[in-house]
Image: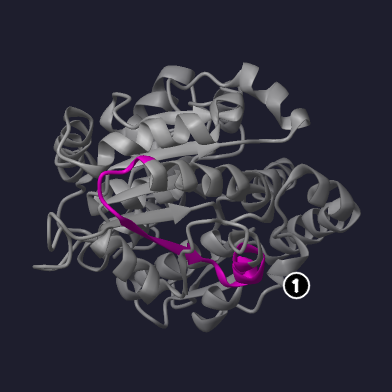
Amino acid sequence: MTDSSPLLIWMVAGEESGDQLGAKLMRSLRARLGPDRVRFEGVGGHAMGREGLRSLFPLEDIAVMGISAVIARLPTILRRIRMTADAAVAAKPDLLVIVDSPDFTHRVAKAVRARAPGIPIVDYVSPSVWAWRPGRAPKMRAYVDHLLALLPFEPEAHRRLGGPPTTYVGHPLIERLGEIRPHPGERGRATDGPIKLLVLPGSRRSEVGRLMEPFGRALDLLRQRSPRPFEVTVPAVPHLVDEIRRRAGTWTVKPQIVEGEAAKWAAFREADAALAASGTVTLELGLSGVPMVVAYRVSKIEEVLKYLIKAPSIVLTNLVLGENVIPELIQWDCTPEKLADALLPLFSDTPERRRQIEAFGRMDDLMRIGDEAPSERAARIVTEVLERFRGNGATA
């Protein structure tokens, strides 16, 4: 910095995952710039609060998922967008960082840019412009000065689509490989023992409601057809554990339901195969080396959106690998029979299983970012943006 006053960085997250990313970025910026040379204000949750951010309002006000939930909360969300933009403009920060949740954070960024065009804006986490609504990418150039991407193919996607300057900073899972990968003797302990099967029906109530029934019936078919017995573990997020337990009560194959991150990663390290809802969990499984089948169902209203999807796959691991090695059964293909048919080859040493495992071996090289942790690399890019906008401004 050119003077003794600390930098003011405004942070705006819209849900828990963004809150976690934002907190790590705050910590890395403080380490890079010095604890007394940067302060933070804005909107965040408990993790960002522990790093010193006093949120304008509780994150729960805007952290809603699903079309019906958003519609029900829309008046509150719109008020919070205006409130956040007003406060950011009044604060005159040195930089605004928006974190994920584009339906909320991008509206804040647009309002700030219109009223205070001198405030640089960094977007941490790319919207899925490579999958659907690619026209969002060039529009982002008007209000995003730099984009920090979690996935290695995203900078090229934004270059191709005309999006803002983009840097791949690495996915936070890279920092957790020691937790999600098996320790010696944890996986495949006995070829004649029970197969360890993970079932992951999603982290949203709507996902659990649509997938638990076909998943349970697929397990019943597998029980009848599998040459080896298998044991099922279902890691459950805290707010859905009762729902998952209730729905699993109708299954003929009774699972072990575990709660908490430590129990989830322990189950990953032991798993031989997985049946999972589409989402970040597919990246977790790929990095853990667990062969999987991926499924998804949406509402009839949301089904219309499939015609807008441009990506060759909905599975993040497939997109990182650049080939569709993981079977994906979507909407009407998500039937018990098809799920069982796709899972059964993963229960033994088959070409289907070997193909996935061999592909997972390439993921480290594809996602590598060097010696920096993702949050450290993100902090470096944010600092470079600050320097560019301040001339001889903040230096690390």
The residue positioned 44% from the left and 30% from the top of the image is: 328
Residue 356: x and y in percent read 22, 35
Q: Which residue is mark 1?
A: 57
Horizontal side, residue 366 vs residue 244: left or right: left
The part of the chain drawn in magenta is 225-245
Task: Report the number of numbered marks.
Answer: 1
The residue positioned 70% from the left and 41% from the top of the image is: 110
240 in the magenta segment:
yes
State the residue lying farthest toward the left.
184
User: Can residue 312 be seen here?
Assistant: yes
Q: Quadrant of the N terminus?
A: bottom left
Up/down of 131 relative to 151, above or below: above
The residue positioned 64% from the left and 16% from the top of the image is: 307
Residue 390: x and y in percent read 45, 53
Up/down of 267 relative to 201, above or below: below
Horizontal side, residue 159 vs residue 210: left or right: left
Front in this rendered view, residue 112 or 162: 162
* Corner quadrant of residue 330: top right
Label 1 environment density (alpha carbons within 10 Å; few <14, some 14–19, many ≥20):
some
Kindly identify the amino acid type of the residue bearing the numbered disc 1.
Answer: Phe
Residue 227: x and y in percent read 26, 44
238 in the magenta segment:
yes
Horizontal side, residue 71 vs residue 348: left or right: right
The residue positioned 75% from the left and 46% from the top of the image is: 115
Circle 1: element type: loop
Residue 325: x and y in percent read 29, 28
Front in this rendered view, residue 344 or 78: 344
Q: Quadrant of the C terminus?
A: bottom left
Front in this rendered view, residue 125 or 202: 202
User: Can residue 101 be seen here?
Assistant: no
* Corner quadrant of residue 153: top left
Up/down of 168 relative to 189, above or below: above
